Image (cartoon, helix red, strand yellow):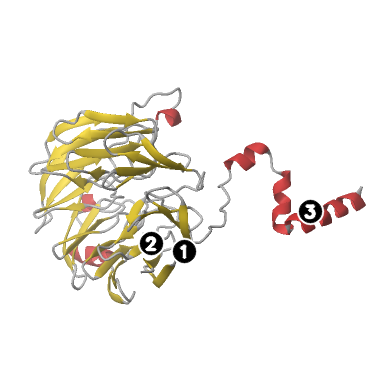
Amino acid sequence: MVRKLILLCAALTLLQGCSTVTGIFKSDKEKASEPAELTDISNPIVIRKLWSVSAGQGEAELAIRQKPVVDGDTLFAADSANQLVAIDKTTGKIKWKATPNKEAASGGWKFWQKPTQPFALTGGPAVYSGLVALGGRNGEVFAFNAADGSVLWKTMVSSSVISAPLITFDTVIVRANDGKVFGLDLSTGEKRWQFDRGLPTLSVRGNSAPVLGPGLIFVGYEDGTLIALRQQDGQRVWEQLIAKPDGRTELDRMSDIDGEIQVGDREVFASSYHNSTMAIALNNGQPIWVREIGGYAGVAMLSDRIIVGDRDSNLWALDRNSGSDFWKQSAFLRRSITTPVVHGTYIVVADAEGYVHWLDSASGDVKGRVKVGGAVRGSPVVSDDGILFIQNVDGQLSAFSLAQ
């Protein structure tokens, strides 16, 4: 019997290689839950890596989908510990680093504001008109001078901030993890308005960032509802249920709108974890169309179509006007892909194994791939001049361009 096993292993080694031998003993159920294997790309496009640099400790196991933000010639990124970094987007050279918890300690928190957990920067940065804003685990919100990283102001909201703020010409809008939305004065951080809404018991980890529309702020909620708030004072204008949270268990009922929301000329697009994507009229919140396709990642938008990933990491291209599908790409099954983004004529997603993929936006065919180390949860970011930035969970930032 021992001799037979040895011969079997030797034969399998010759046929498949030692690294795959263990896979033959896995059950069909185990194999079905594994990430899809990546296949070779014929005639891949040329992708140039411009630089790579560490932005700190990364987000580790917090699953907060941190990503950088670009303003002019500078890239801003935060880690989950205590560091905001400004980086030259062309060279990768670090311009400055800020450590806001030291500033917070010297400022003297009130006794009722003392953190209940270790300090961490859990929200991604946002930037506007020389000000960088981001939030922390215990409800801290910081505003920094984009030129040198000095703290302009700091304030507290009701709970942790795990998504990037939205900054307008006079307000910093912050979504707290308890569902409250705060409008903070851009100059001082003082609270101008507050919107409050309850949350379901169980939800997917993560929050969609507030998004600006024409006089409106759009916020996605864990019960599958998209809400439009008036930009001026945070009053609710309308709300629309993207997906009804039904099912026998709380897991079945999870309907979070956690991915990125896109605003068009007359409609807003949002996707729910409960397998639903909807186009909604901006003026009154009425549905234009709905498809039973959706997930946690969110939506990318082109002139004639939107791109959305479902819960199994299939990627779909849907007509903006009707919701009918142009194509479906299943090469990334169970790979936990990020929100898709548009990069030139391509669609880009990253996955939980640290691969970044470029797809032809017209056909959905996979055209390019690079590896950036650790898993990627936050969506890629593209600058106006076509540089694509990726931040992995280990805090490594990489920049890529497409060959001309």
Q: Earlier in the sequence, mark 3 or mark 2?
A: 3
Q: Which residue is labeled 3 in the image?
A: 12
Q: How many marks?
A: 3
Give the Cα separation between the discs numbered 2 and 1. Answer: 8 Å
Q: Earlier in the sequence, mark 1 or mark 3?
A: 3
Give the Cα separation between the discs numbered 3 and 2. Answer: 38 Å
Q: Which residue is labeled 2 in the image?
A: 390
Image coordinates for residue 217, horizontal then vertical, percent: 17, 43
Q: Is label 2 in contact with label 1 (beta carbons under 8 Å)?
A: yes
Callout 2 secondary element: strand
Image coordinates for residue 173, horizontal then vertical, percent: 17, 49
Above/below status of 116 relative to 382: above
Image coordinates for residue 357, horizontal then vertical, percent: 45, 56
Residue name at image x 13 percent, y 53 percent: 168
Q: Earlier in the sequence, mark 2 or mark 1?
A: 1
Above/below status of 164 relative to 256: below
Q: Is label 1 in contact with label 3 (beta carbons under 8 Å)?
A: no
Give the Cα separation between the discs numbered 1 and 3. Answer: 32 Å
Residue name at image x 15 percent, y 30 percent: 284
Callout 3 secondary element: helix
Mark 2, residues whose alpha carbon is within 10 Å: few (<14), some, or many (≥20)? many
Image coordinates for residue 395, horizontal then vertical, percent: 40, 64
Residue 94's label in the rendered image is none
Residue 372's label in the rendered image is 1
Quarter of the image that includes the C terminus: bottom left
